[in-house]
């Protein structure tokens, strides 16, 4: 058919009549069929579908654009001009400390559990491989890894790290791994989960190394039996003292320095090192059925109980001596960094009492409860006074001093003089005023809550204890899955019991929509950055600074590379109070993804 005839044949009879083609003896045309009704419009996508799309967009952006080879730091300017972990970082770095690389990895794996979408598994896998590359040969992890190599990492420590006045753990490169800040614990948990997911042998090898690190680092023999050091393996280049520039500025009667030398070899309770390691080993017992790890767990629990000091000061310190040292006995509280004096620590005591509750629930052994009242009585004896709270704004809302002196039971308060690491130093005395803001001089201790928990546990009948222990991961004996999600909230001891289900938070459709509305079209959420830094510009001056502009702030002069809140800088030029900038953070990504995960696939 010619094109014109084709066009005509598509005209209606009315149009043909108007053209002279509808009458006479001309050709007739069959009636046109009635066109089918238009399909009904597709329903709008459900909120759940939109949430999944938002999760894909956000995870894709983090994996492909934000991460470096699957590794993450903590925070990024949107143009990636500056990025931070606990300090300013380089683009080739990943941060192991939460909320860094393993935190992001757990979130990606949780998203995979919620959706079954391989995009999320691939992102988790990439992060897992980054952690394998960052894993120390001993099996643990350092705070940081630099994909550019050890020379680059050492240079960072010698420049940026060395000038962070308040961050002594970054002022020296140890070359080993650490239990501090749960970096190794969270990374080890992630290796366990990645192996369990698809039985990938790459993750099994890394997991076995991590288990070996935890078990081999545990002290054997003596009072320290079952405890863990802060770092491992021991470093021959470890720092055992701090410089004291301009000592004439040290007040009379004050004490300065690291009172017990290299703190990385002491039995460590700071940041709940023992609790984190025990929890990881319990996860391996539950998920792998590896009963060979149980003795390491029981030794660790016994160590914590053994390290409780005799009454009336029946508490714990941040660290305790692992061996006899300078006339002091193994097991006695030890000093650590130059702003962590030899003392008892009220917040560590609270944490350890709560761990004793956990150990009783795990074992049914009433011995773990036996000395809890002594610890609580001691905490009752060393509260802050009303005068202390009134005269130090940083103590508002706190009940106890952080550090309590051995013997006298008086608070020990930390201070500093100078303006940077090269002309200033930390010291401690009994003056409750003018304490640093970055290391709280006071803690909020819930003695009443702990007494209530103690009464509940101590009042359990033998039958109730037997029923409780029957579900304990130490006693149940059957290999079981771990909780479905790890990034929505911290997995605790109770979540590992056989009769427990770790539920997810309730997130409404309205809440999910609010999260999606804040997602940038490129795929990221912005959040205020509460910490910025001075760029490294060389070592600071050694000449004395006798002012007080920096004594209670997070940062010193412009040579100090320590992070600080731009909304609360020192009150001295060139610092100017500024609004917190907006940036991309792993913490906000995990928080927002967690809400969408809980909305799309809740555990009830």
Image: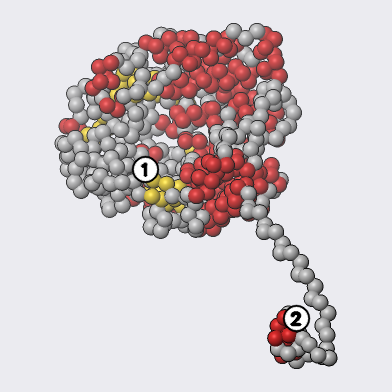
- For the N terminus, the image quarter is bottom right
- The vertical placement of 246 against 362, above or below, is below
Q: Report whether residue 214 is seen.
A: no
Quadrant in which residue 456 is drawn: top right
* Rendered residue at 43%/42% (across/down): 174
Which of the pair 385/513 is nearer the observer? 513
- For the residues carrying marks 2 and 1, which lies nearer the camera in this image? 2
The residue labelled by disc 2 is 13
* Rendered residue at 83%/91% (across/down): 25
Place of residue 347 in the rendered image (x, y in percent of width and height, measured from the top left) = 42, 23
Residue lying farthest front? 24
Asked if disc 2 and disc 1 are in contact, CB closer than 8 Å, the reply is no
- Count of marks placed on residues: 2
How dense is the environment of label 2, judged by Cα within 10 Å: few (below 14), some, or many (20 and up)?
A: some
Question: Which numbered disc, 2 or 1, marks the residue that appears first in the sequence?
Answer: 2
- The vertical placement of 559 against 344, above or below, is below
């Amino acid at each position: 058919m010619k094109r014109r005839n084709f066009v005509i044949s598509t005209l209606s009879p009315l149009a043909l009549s108007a053209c002279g083609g509808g009458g006479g003896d001309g050709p007739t045309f069959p009636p046109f069929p009635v066109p089918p009704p238009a399909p009904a419009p597709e329903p709008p996508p459900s909120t759940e579908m939109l949430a999944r799309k938002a999760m894909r967009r956000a995870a894709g952006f983090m994996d492909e654009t934000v991460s470096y080879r699957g590794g993450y730091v903590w925070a990024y300017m949107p143009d990636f001009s500056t990025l931070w972990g606990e300090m300013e970082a380089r683009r080739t770095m990943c941060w192991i400390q939460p909320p860094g690389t393993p935190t992001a990895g757990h979130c990606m794996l949780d998203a995979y559990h919620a959706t079954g979408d391989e995009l999320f598994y691939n992102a988790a896998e990439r992060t897992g491989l980054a952690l394998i590359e960052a894993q120390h040969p001993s099996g643990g992890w350092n705070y940081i890894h630099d994909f550019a190599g050890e020379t680059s990492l050492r240079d960072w420590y010698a420049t940026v790290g060395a000038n962070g006045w308040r961050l002594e753990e970054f002022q020296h490169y140890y070359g080993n791994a650490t239990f501090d800040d749960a970096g190794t614990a969270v990374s080890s948990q992630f290796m366990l989960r990645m192996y369990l997911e698809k039985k990938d042998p790459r993750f099994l090898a890394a997991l076995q190394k991590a288990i070996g690190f935890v078990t081999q680092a545990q002290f054997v023999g003596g009072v320290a039996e079952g405890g863990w050091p802060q770092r491992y393996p021991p470093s021959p280049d470890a720092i055992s003292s701090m410089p004291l520039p301009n000592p004439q500025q040290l007040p009379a009667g004050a004490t300065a320095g690291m009172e017990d030398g290299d703190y990385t070899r002491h039995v460590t309770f700071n940041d709940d090192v023992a609790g984190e390691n025990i929890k990881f080993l319990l996860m391996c017992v539950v998920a792998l059925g590896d009963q060979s790890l149980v003795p390491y767990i029981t030794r660790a629990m016994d160590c914590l109980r053994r390290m409780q000091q005799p009454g009336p000061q029946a508490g714990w310190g941040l660290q305790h001596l692992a061996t006899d040292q300078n006339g002091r006995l193994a097991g006695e509280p030890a000093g650590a960094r130059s702003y962590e004096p030899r003392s008892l620590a009220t917040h560590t005591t609270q944490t350890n009492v709560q761990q004793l509750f956990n150990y009783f629930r795990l074992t049914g052994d009433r011995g773990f409860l036996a000395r809890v009242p002594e610890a609580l009585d001691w905490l009752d004896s060393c509260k802050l006074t009303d005068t202390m709270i009134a005269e130090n704004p940083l103590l508002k809302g706190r009940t106890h001093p952080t550090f309590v002196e051995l013997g006298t039971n008086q608070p020990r308060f930390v201070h500093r003089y100078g303006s940077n690491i090269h002309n200033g130093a930390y010291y401690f005395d009994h003056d409750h005023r003018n304490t640093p803001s970055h290391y709280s001089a006071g803690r909020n201790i819930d003695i009443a809550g702990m007494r209530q928990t103690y009464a509940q546990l101590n009042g359990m009948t033998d039958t109730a204890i037997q029923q409780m222990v029957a579900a304990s991961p130490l006693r149940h004996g059957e290999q079981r899955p771990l909780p479905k999600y790890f990034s929505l909230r911290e997995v605790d001891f109770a979540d590992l019991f056989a009769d427990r289900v770790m539920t997810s938070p309730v997130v409404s459709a309205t809440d999910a929509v609010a999260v999606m509305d804040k997602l940038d079209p490129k795929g990221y959420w912005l959040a205020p950055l509460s910490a910025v830094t001075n760029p490294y510009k060389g070592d600071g001056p050694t000449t004395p600074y006798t002012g007080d502009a920096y004594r209670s702030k997070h940062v010193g002069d412009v040579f100090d590379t320590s992070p600080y809140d731009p909304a609360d800088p020192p009150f001295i030029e060139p610092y100017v109070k500024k609004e917190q900038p907006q940036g991309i953070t792993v913490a906000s990504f995990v928080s927002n993804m967690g809400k969408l995960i809980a909305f799309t696939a809740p555990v009830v």
